[in-house]
Amino acid sequence: MSSKLDSDLTWSDDEIMTITAAKILKNTDTCFVGIGIPSTAAILAKSMHAPNLFLIYESGTVNTNPQKLPLSIGDGELANEALTVVGMPEIFNYWLQSGRIDVGFLGAAQIDRYANINTTYIGQTYQAPKVRLPGAGGATEIAGACKEVIIIINQTKRAFVNQVDFVTSMGFGDGVGSREKYGLRGGGPSKVITNLGILEPDPKTLELTMTHLHPGVSKEQVIENTGWELKFSQSMKITEQPKPVELTKIRELIKTSDR
Amino acid sequence: MSSKLDSDLTWSDDEIMTITAAKILKNTDTCFVGIGIPSTAAILAKSMHAPNLFLIYESGTVNTNPQKLPLSIGDGELANEALTVVGMPEIFNYWLQSGRIDVGFLGAAQIDRYANINTTYIGQTYQAPKVRLPGAGGATEIAGACKEVIIIINQTKRAFVNQVDFVTSMGFGDGVGSREKYGLRGGGPSKVITNLGILEPDPKTLELTMTHLHPGVSKEQVIENTGWELKFSQSMKITEQPKPVELTKIRELIKTSDR
Amino acid sequence: MVKFADLSSAINEFVKDGETIAMEGFTHLIPFAAGHEIIRQKIKDLTAIRLTPDLIYDQMIGAGCIKKLIFSWGGNPGVGSLHRFRDAYQNSWPQKLEIEEHTHAGLTNKYVAGASGLPFTVMRGYRGSDLFDQTSGVVEINSPFSDEVLTAVSAINPDVTVLHAQQADKAGNVMLWGITGVAREAVFAAKKVLVTVEEVVEEFTPKFNSIIIPNIQIDVISLAPRGAWPSYASGYYERDNSAYIAWDKIAKERDTFLTWLDDVIHKESNAKGPKS
Amino acid sequence: MVKFADLSSAINEFVKDGETIAMEGFTHLIPFAAGHEIIRQKIKDLTAIRLTPDLIYDQMIGAGCIKKLIFSWGGNPGVGSLHRFRDAYQNSWPQKLEIEEHTHAGLTNKYVAGASGLPFTVMRGYRGSDLFDQTSGVVEINSPFSDEVLTAVSAINPDVTVLHAQQADKAGNVMLWGITGVAREAVFAAKKVLVTVEEVVEEFTPKFNSIIIPNIQIDVISLAPRGAWPSYASGYYERDNSAYIAWDKIAKERDTFLTWLDDVIHKESNAKGPKS
């Protein structure tokens, strides 16, 4: 999907997801970043309003400031531009598990109404899946430990399902009390950013509720692309439209990184 | 005590203890070293028959090759001459606890017939001791984990007691089966080197038994200086007399290190 | 005590059929040259541990070296799927592949327990994930000091750990720098250690973020310049991303894979990639 | 976020009566300047943690700053006893001193648990020692994967950790090298972190055996050249062993100690030792 609104501004799905995610990050945040759009959003945020954003990647790079988009979670660029690089026990036990990360940034193949996410398999069984996916990586413990988790995912009926085939990483389980039951000390998902808008957990039920639509996106479009009976916030907002300067930045970043 | 035997050879208690201990170390050993005579013996061994002796100090210095005697367990000399220096969790968990150290070298204030050692307090109670000593440091786990432990201690009635006031570090507890009961995987004390000779655990009872006397030392002298009814090995030997080259080496080492 | 040997002799002596092997290097310093030599020597029935199987295990799985895979993230980083892994797991080609799946934090801590000489270690993890019930060696444990329930993970102690590093010195000590992942723990946890290196140097110079592996922890060192290609070796060469993309096509079909196996591995033609 | 402040303001703002404090530095980089400032500010009722109390806590105990000592080896290294520690523990002078005693391995692992956000961690230790029954936070734990009995030690999380380091950069990141002991863990375990440094530099240069503490983990940095004297700072100055020997005499009697306290600490005359 590519949207055209106002004068000559157009953007792609990835672009508005990335820019929307970037804007959420604060200059003082400590952010645990996965590869792909989360990483692009974090790097974009650092180049704009959040130069001090403290980025950690599971490969061990601490306070890294990549000038190009990394190809993998352990890209040389991430190591070269880091304040320091440490072993993975330190990353997972001292940085993540201790609860000192503000924002965890995750992608997913499937998500359900309680923001549980699946990156393990789609269809049939764990033992004999229809499609086997990469698995957990760092996600399970990122989802458990960060003060908040931001999930970035394209909103489609295939991805937004009533029940995920496999809970790789818990969001809110089956609602209030689930995270406590499993001793997850982080706050859980605070926002799900899609190509259509933003969903947030309802403060009472913790069910994902549409709170923002991107410019030009209709409620019907969102309902069509969600596999459960989606609720909308009573105070729905329209996401801020990407600014030319943001689109220019992101395109430059991607161009510079082409290898 | 200073002995004079043969021609013009004399040595001090410390010198014969140090030289005797040094000779026991093998070129291929990995050795966890405490400060004082253990350290002097290890450095002496490296300068003589065991240049590849692999020395680890609890401060984190790995494969260190000090040219002077360290003043403390974390002396700059130990760090400067080390292959690498690591944090103490790595020292205690990865190097020591994993069971990869061949020889642990310990001193003590008290020792009993089962080679349990005390470095915590002497007299009265733990809560209100007559003399408070420094405590465990690395010793408890060194005594537990090393393949063998060598203890260096002056043989006196005050030190060689029927029962130590406090077991800081277990030797053989109250005999056969004690180490197993507490899950201690190392072999325990193999030798106690004193100013009078060498004691070793009896292969059957694990009770410390005098196996060597230093040149010029009598059985009576040893009995007088031991607080329990000491047993002697059926094949008592005389320790090899310090050679002039050994005495020269050790004296040079101490002279060089004077600060 | 460490010795230096050519890679073929080193693999022949230190990697045996049926063993548990850990070939680590987190996106960086992946020991591809050693993996290819294992394929060439047709070593079989390995239980192979790696956080990220990556291309190296995809290749070894396709070649029939691996019976069981213990891992925590099984994709082609930045590209997509590992087709040989999928084909083995889903279709048992060329043979059945057992899996034991973990999280990165979990597998990292299993190495930590192994390195520490403990039967297990304690962490916060797995709970709330369906993985908790699907994997093994992961159980709940009560804190003796609070009413918290935590996760205990059992130790792993590979028969042999294989690493690629930048440098060895003449005494056989090894230095790695940059991203080192779980290299330190994989060495301490292992019974035998085989290291391939870019270079043997007279003396190490200080680097940021370096670790040194003392020679007494290593059994054999083989010189293997570009031995991490197509991954990278910080200070020596960069990741060859085109090879990661090309692998997607090669691995997609069995016949293109088999051709690759014949041409690239068994004929030893281009195994280390274009010279830089 | 980190700030730079003079040591007097830093201690005043970040060290409070009754808190739990960890002042680490294993024989190297002992934060003596900070300790002396704590004495000057007459901070009271501290629960003070250190593997080796060393002279720094002997001085603070004698000055009446410490209510409870948590430690694992309490001597004057290479010299003898800590007389102020003994006098407080045995004779309650200048006040009663509670102790909680551990082994080095145990206290190290208590920091590891604290740094890891766990209530406890597992180790092999204490068992067979009478210390097992005399200390607290140390219990047996069964392995869920074998029939082994291990030791669980409870976490420590100091209110404030105080370190001395060689360098800070202008952004407030800190670099230590040489023997670092449990510095890393003491920082991760703490709620607040105060660091004194030898020097503020434009940019760090690579050193063997260095660790970097990112600025987000530090609350305040104070410039304190020779701030580790009479211990040492690798690359800056050596241990002043004569001061360790001299301390034995000063500390032996209450009156010589009190004179030292007046002359050296409260009059701030010679606290940092002779200029090198």
Image (cartoon, coloured by chain):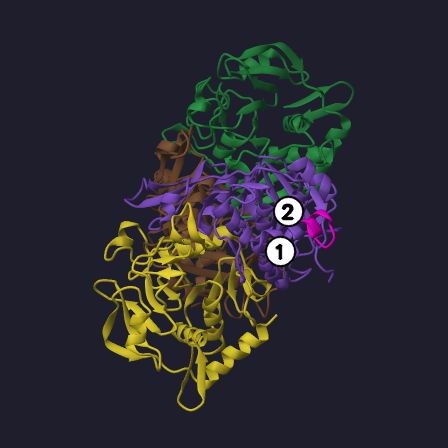
Chain colours: A green, B yellow, C brown, D purple
Q: Does residue B206 appear left or right of residue C235 in this picture?
A: left
Q: Is residue B158 above or below residue A112?
A: below
Horizontal and vertical percent position of residue A78? 63, 45
Residue D269 located within the stretch drawn in magenta: yes
Q: Does residue D202 appear left or right of residue B251 in this picture?
A: right
Write the residue at 35% across / 46% down: C119
Residue stretch in magenta: D262-271
Task: Categorize mark 1 by other alpha carbons within 10 Å: few (<14), some (14-19), many (20+).
Answer: many
Q: Nearer the viewer, residue C236 or B11?
A: B11
Horizontal and vertical percent position of residue D91? 50, 46
Q: Is residue C94 above or below residue A4?
A: below
Q: Nearer the viewer, residue B180 or B11?
A: B11
Q: Quadrant of the N terminus of chain B?
A: bottom left
- Name the image quarter holding residue A218: top right
Amino acid carrying mark 1 in the image: Trp
Q: Nearer the viewer, residue C64 or C27?
A: C27
The residue to which callout 2 is attached is: D35
Amino acid carrying mark 2 in the image: Gly
| Chain letter for the residue marked with disc 2 in the picture | D
Write the residue at 52% across / 79% down: B251
The residue to which callout 1 is attached is: D177
Q: Is residue B61 above or below residue A191?
A: below
User: Which residue is situated farthest in the front direction here?
Assistant: D255
| Chain letter for the residue marked with disc 1 in the picture | D
Horizontal and vertical percent position of residue D138? 40, 42
